[in-house]
Image (tube, rainbow, N blue to C red):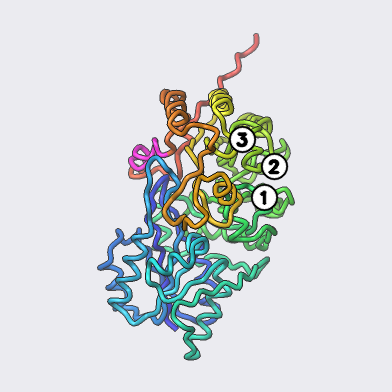
Amino acid sequence: MRVLLISSNVAQTPYPVYPLGMSMIATAARADGHQVEFFDFLQNAMSLTALRQRLIEFEPAVVGISIRNIDNVNMLHEERYLDAVTEIVESIHRSSPAKVILGGTAFSIFPDLIMRTTGADYGVVGEGEELFRQFLAKVEGGHWPPPGTVFSDRPRLRGQAIPAAAYDPHILGHYLREGSVASLQSKRGCPHRCVYCSYPVLEGREIRSRDPQQVVDDIETLAREHRAESVFFTDSVFNDDQGEHMPVLEEMKRRGLRVPWSAFFKPSGITPDKVELMKEVGLRSVEMGSDAATDETLRGQRKSFVWNDVLKANRQFMEAGIPTAHYFMFGGPGETAETAKAGIDHLLQLQCTVSFVFLGIRILPATELHRLAVEQGVVSADHDLLEPVYYISPTVDRDWLQSALEQAFAKHRRIMFPPDRFDRHLRMLHKMGYAGALWEMLRPTPAAKPHSG
């Protein structure tokens, strides 16, 4: 059966992101003998004409659309992406008899609302590899489900059942030329209980790791066949407490790999030995999910670490010469004027790093933050949340908080508030051939120690 997979993502900041999930779906579908092709909306300059031409040429029976984000979760400069998906679905229905099935992380959070908004035929909630294969098997046998069916059995794949991505050389090449980095996944699931996060809803709380040898095979493929100069692990947290990341690092060391890489880290559990090993196998930079800047607000977000862990992790990476960036959200549960002032002081004292600061936290359904927001009257229980709503604690004034953050960070190049303040410069640097988020260029370097004698 002919299957066209479309990446509908149009976000380009801080850099365009290769459609990894779509490529993993392709591997699963091709394993069953289906003829699968890709269409990347961003690569094709968001051209519906180009899409219609591909539909005419390929004549797919099924079109799968991956929806990565609903919006940019930045309340000060909002961007919304669902209109592009609706236009894609409408264009397919006008140009082709193919049935449209939606999936992806954003769809899995708002499946019913997005089905109604876009007019798609079917949907897949959660991990799509097995559910999409089952769907294709049914329709290939002539058994089309009733229109509007959303499949959501939520099977949890693990080990070798989590497929490697079928990286498309033309699409990946485009993203690398546009300043992106190559992405891969080593595990799924997140056991943490952060109040705002949808990862446990999407992937479950149990960590399910891919085979370490296959993960490192992916790194070698990206570097040798696709000429990727660096890779990024998309795991919710790379340095998990269970140590599932260690076999990947050890396999990288066994093969002598030195491909530069980065990932999302949590501040706790960082030790000098682990930092040394990660640096030895190519760790280039660290993106830290610090999230809040005081112990009180960290507790409010249900974090498993304290501010001292953030300082310690930052210091260890700094001493190892590994650049770090931190992400902070002000206005979360427990925020007051006093905690905000203390948090601002903490960020100003954080050494040799870059910080991205957000005002408020995007409320997503089925999260602890949603329950709390309803309880506190921040949002009504029947609000659908497809249109962005941001939580700011009732114990702090929103206008005062925004003004305090603006005044505190305006003159500090290494602290980004709003978090997209550097985006215009990023786009220029990407056009010049630089790759990645490039926040490393904003990081102050440690002062040289004076020579003795």
Asked if the stretch drawn in magenta spans residue 278, the answer is no
- Residue tagged 2: 304
- Residue tagged 3: 297
For disc 2, the neighbor class at 10 Å (few under 14, some 14 to 19, many from 20) is some
Q: Quadrant of the C terminus?
A: top right
In the rendered image, the residue lying farthest to the left is 49
Residue type at mark 2 is Ser
Q: Quadrant of residue 115?
A: bottom left
Residue type at mark 1 is His
Q: Is residue 259 left or right of residue 144?
A: right
Q: Are marks 2 and 1 in contact (CB under 8 Å)?
A: yes
Q: Quadrant of residue 446?
A: top right
In the image, the segment drawn in magenta is 420-429
Q: Earlier in the sequence, mark 3 or mark 2?
A: 3
For disc 3, the neighbor class at 10 Å (few under 14, some 14 to 19, many from 20) is many
**Residue at x 35%, y 65% (from the top left corner):** 86
The percent position of residue 405, horizontal first and vertical second, equals 46, 28
Circle nearer the viewer, 3 or 2? 3
- Residue tagged 1: 192
Asked whether the viewer can see residue 144, the reply is yes
Asked if the stretch drawn in magenta spans residue 427, the answer is yes
Q: Is residue 97 above or below residue 286?
A: below
Q: Secondary structure at mark 2?
A: loop
